[in-house]
Image (spheres, rainbow, N blue to C red):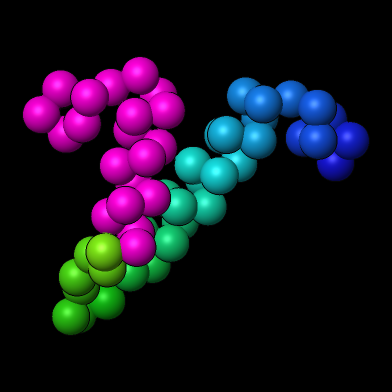
């Protein structure tokens, strides 16, 4: 855990992994919808990764 406290790249990766796991759990449900909170977190992660958004692909 000491490494995570010092390494910004690994902290970012850990955050991204948590958001992706939450999205996967949410989207695996029959009434799958993307909450505004998760949509905002996903957008923030995409911007942090250096992309302008979903249209950038």
Q: Judge whether 32 appears above or below 49 on screen.
A: below
On screen, residue 3 versus residue 38, left or right, reads right
Q: Look at the magenta stretch and give its main secondary structure.
A: helix
Say which residue appears at 30% left-offset and 42% top-offset: 43
Would residue 33 be visible to someone looking at this image? yes
Say whether residue 14 is left or right of residue 56: right
Give the quarter of the image for residue 35. Answer: bottom left
Q: Which residue is drawn at 32% across and 52% down?
A: 40
Residue at the spot 77% in from the left edge and 35% down from the top edge: 4
Quadrant where the image shows the N terminus: top right
Say if the magenta span includes residue 27: no
- Quadrant assignment, res 9: top right
Q: Quadrant of residue 7?
A: top right
Q: In this view, does 5 lie above or below 42?
A: above
Q: Give the range drawn in magenta.
A: 37-57
Residue 8 in the image: state x and y as whole percent. Answer: 67, 26
**Vertical relation: 23 (above or below) 56:** below
Q: Nearer the viewer, residue 28 or 50?
A: 50
Residue closest to the eye, 12 or 27: 12
Give residue 54's position: percent from left, percent from top: 16, 34
Return the residue found at the far right. Answer: 2
Taking the image as drawn, is residue 28 in sight? no
- Residue furthest to the left: 55
Q: From the viewer's side, name the closer residue of 28 and 57.
A: 57
Image: 41 above or below 24: above
């Amino acid at each position: 855990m000491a490494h995570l406290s010092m390494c910004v790249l690994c902290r970012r990766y850990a955050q991204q992994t948590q958001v992706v796991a939450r999205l996967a759990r949410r989207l695996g449900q029959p009434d799958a919808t993307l909450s505004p909170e998760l949509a905002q977190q996903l957008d923030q992660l995409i911007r942090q990764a250096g992309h302008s958004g979903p249209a950038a692909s």
